[in-house]
Amino acid sequence: MAEGIRIAPAEPAPESTADRLARYMRLGTLSLPALPPLSLYVHLPWCLKKCPYCDFNSHEWRDGGAPPEARYLDALRADLEAALPFIWGRRAVSVFIGGGTPSLFSPDAIGTLIADIRARLPLEPGCEITLEANPGTFERDRFRAFRDAGVTRLSIGVQSFDDARLARSAACTTRRRRAPPSKRPHAASTPSTST
Ligand SMILES: C[S@@+](CC[C@H](N)C(=O)[O-])C[C@H]1O[C@@H](n2cnc3c(N)ncnc32)[C@H](O)[C@@H]1O
Ligand code: SF4
């Protein structure tokens, strides 16, 4: 048999992640009558200090003052915009702003974050918007301001109601630091809570 130049069939180009996602997300691919609603998670990674037991992506803010709110909000906005092509036409039923200790961010910054989300992603009416909060990083007026900023629910981490246990676990809060009675939130000023 004559030897000659043999042309192998071209290898198919590898499918890009964006193409693969678009293929999976096509209506009917997953045999779903409609694409399911979304829940959006937003991570704010800073804390007053790092608890020794914590496995989360959380970091002590060492530079003093407030965390870098404006720069981080810019980055979150860009991140959400980059993800939008994958979720066109879908709505979110819940938003969870977790951490870290998101309640270290000012109510103004949280308001800007929520407005940025609303401007880019349709939220279902009554969409639950949760903010994770650490005892010691909020008090009544701040609660009210978070509520006014659009937060409808707080998720509060309580490691123990016993200060001695808290001290042993080196958690960055104590019952006393949680809030003096005069500053404790009350129902009228507080979004719904979970602990
Ligand atoms: C990551 S924190 C974020 C909210 C807030 N900073 C706080 O401490 O409550 C949320 C919850 O995760 C819990 N947690 C932290 N490290 C954990 C671990 N290694 N295993 C299980 N839960 C953990 C904390 O106790 C806290 O209640
Ligand atoms: S405050 Fe919460 S997120 Fe921060 S280090 Fe402690 S457990 Fe982790």
Image: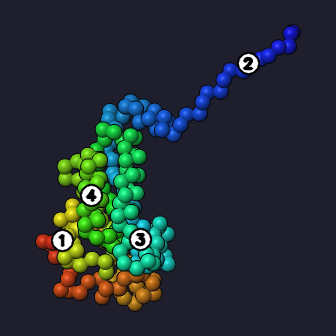
The tag earlier along the polypeptide, 4 or 3, is 3
Residue 165 falls in image quadrant: bottom left
The C terminus is located in which quarter?
bottom left
The residue that label 2 is drawn on is 7
Question: Is residue 190 depicted above or below 14 in this figure?
Answer: below
Badge 3 local density, few (<14 within 10 Å), some, or many (20+)? many
Using residue 120 as the reference point, say whether residue 48 is left or right of it.
Answer: right
Residue under the image location 36 percent in, 34 percent down? 32
> Hey, which residue is sitting farthest left in the picture?
188
The tag earlier along the polypeptide, 3 or 2, is 2
The residue that label 4 is drawn on is 114
Between the residue at mark 4 and the residue at mark 1, the CA separation in whole angstroms equals 16 Å
Mark 1 lies on a secondary structure that is helix
- Residue 12 can be seen in this image: yes
**Residue 115, how many percent across, how many down?**
25, 55
The N terminus is located in which quarter?
top right
Mark identifier at residue 46: 3
Between the residue at mark 2 and the residue at mark 4, the CA separation in whole angstroms equals 57 Å
Which amino acid is tagged 3?
Trp
The residue that label 1 is drawn on is 144
Residue contact at pointers 2 and 1, CB within 8 angstroms: no
Residue contact at pointers 3 and 1, CB within 8 angstroms: no
Question: Is residue 75 depicted above or below 53 in this figure?
Answer: above
